[in-house]
Image: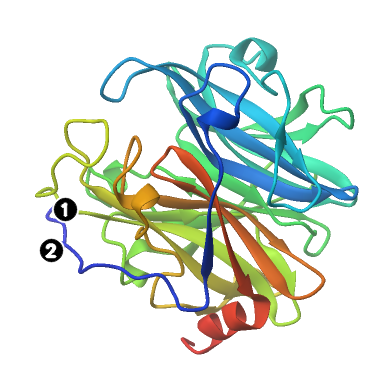
Amino acid sequence: MNYEPMLPPLKSSGVIKKRGIILSKKDIPYKADCIFNAGVAKYKGRYVMIFRNDYGHRGSWVFEGCSLGIAFSDDGISWSVESEPFMTLEKLGIRECKRIYDPRLTVIEDKLFICFAFDTEHGIRGGVGSVREDFSGIDILSLSSPDNRNMVLFPEKTDGKYVRLERPFTIYSRGGKDRFDLWISKSPDLKYWGEENLLLAVENVPYANDKIGPGAPPVRTDKGWLTLFHAVDIDNTRGKHGWEDKWTKRYSAGIMLLDLRNPERVIGVSKLPLIAPEEEYETEEGFRTNVVFPGGMILEDNGEVKIYYGASDTFECLATADVNDLINLCISEK
């Protein structure tokens, strides 16, 4: 496949205020190297974060392992990390699982649910589970077939069905290389999933020429489901950007608005990135630089939106914006 030419420098929207790094390896009381791509939810009066931890860096792209950690906060800004990992391969107990990562959290009817990705000897799969009330672990509800990941749940049912966003890996049917899109599916019980439909294609995002996919779980607003997604552009002339010998991709975050009654209908998509890699911790420091990846979004009572995102596959960061500004970004691009 011949990719489009390198896209120009990207800039974050003016409505976004970046608050910097809120969690890194120095905050973790056990072995840690890269803390990023966390799921965040407001649950029973406090903020909960489950984050990805790649640990034991062995050079280039190789790590000893990956686990999920958990932290709590009273304000969504300052975090207290538990003394032990929340989830390890041994604790998860999935056959032939090699790695668990990229958690996403959603509260549905006062219960906390988690989506996650995991690697196996026979492909990448996505999982959905419920988090136990004492945070001792998760109860698995469904596991996808390969290859699928980046799953996020909507916080409400639509017409009596659960809804999720996902990103299947359609290699052969999309030209033999990365060309991944954002899909939507439904379930009567969080176990059996179907009714899959394409929601947003990579060619519909001007700042992506490689792939797109879900970001944080959608947030309900009066105007529709405010929905983040990740967008990737690639240019093979890019060289060393991080710890690997060569890293050619750039990740940014986009935003769209979906219909409340029919989330398969896109009301509007911002034609410019919401969050782009610009700060030093997004472009110069870390494992894979030029990367921002949104994994959590919380709408506060005062209209402030907290957006949690991974930077450089190494840090967990926070940005904030006003909900009406975010909605207007989407509606103005209808």
Q: Residues within 10 Å of mark 2 (few under 14, many from 20)?
A: few
Q: Residues within 10 Å of mark 1 (few under 14, many from 20)?
A: some
Residue topped by disc 2 = 5
Label 2 – label 1 distance at C-alpha: 7 Å
> Which label sits on residue 252?
none
Q: Secondary structure at mark 2?
A: loop
Could you tell me the amino acid type at mark 2? Pro
Labels 2 and 1 touching (C-beta < 8 A) = yes
Image-quadrant location for residue 312: top left
Could you tell me the amino acid type at mark 1? Asp
- Residue 129 in percent (x, y) is at 73, 33
At 54% across and 54% down in the image, what residue appears? 215
Seen in the picture, residue 135 relative to 249 is either above or below; the reply is above
> Which label sits on residue 235?
1
Image-quadrant location for residue 240: top left
Residue 324 vs residue 112, the one in the foreground: 324
Position of residue 60 in the picture relative to residue 191 (left or right):
left
At 89% across and 52% down in the image, what residue appears? 109
Seen in the picture, residue 320 relative to 105 is either above or below; the reply is below
At 14% across and 48% down in the image, what residue appears? 238
Indicate how the structure is coloured in the image: rainbow
- Residue 35 in percent (x, y) is at 52, 34
Residue 162 vs residue 41, the one in the foreground: 41
Q: Secondary structure at mark 1?
A: loop
Seen in the picture, residue 171 relative to 91 is either above or below; the reply is below
Position of residue 295 in the picture relative to residue 86 (left or right):
left
Q: Is residue 27 visible?
A: yes
Instruction: Pick whichever of labels 2 and 1 is earlier in the sequence.
Output: 2
Position of residue 241 in the picture relative to residue 127 (left or right):
left
Seen in the picture, residue 68 relative to 314 is either above or below; the reply is above
Residue 8 vs residue 207, the one in the foreground: 8
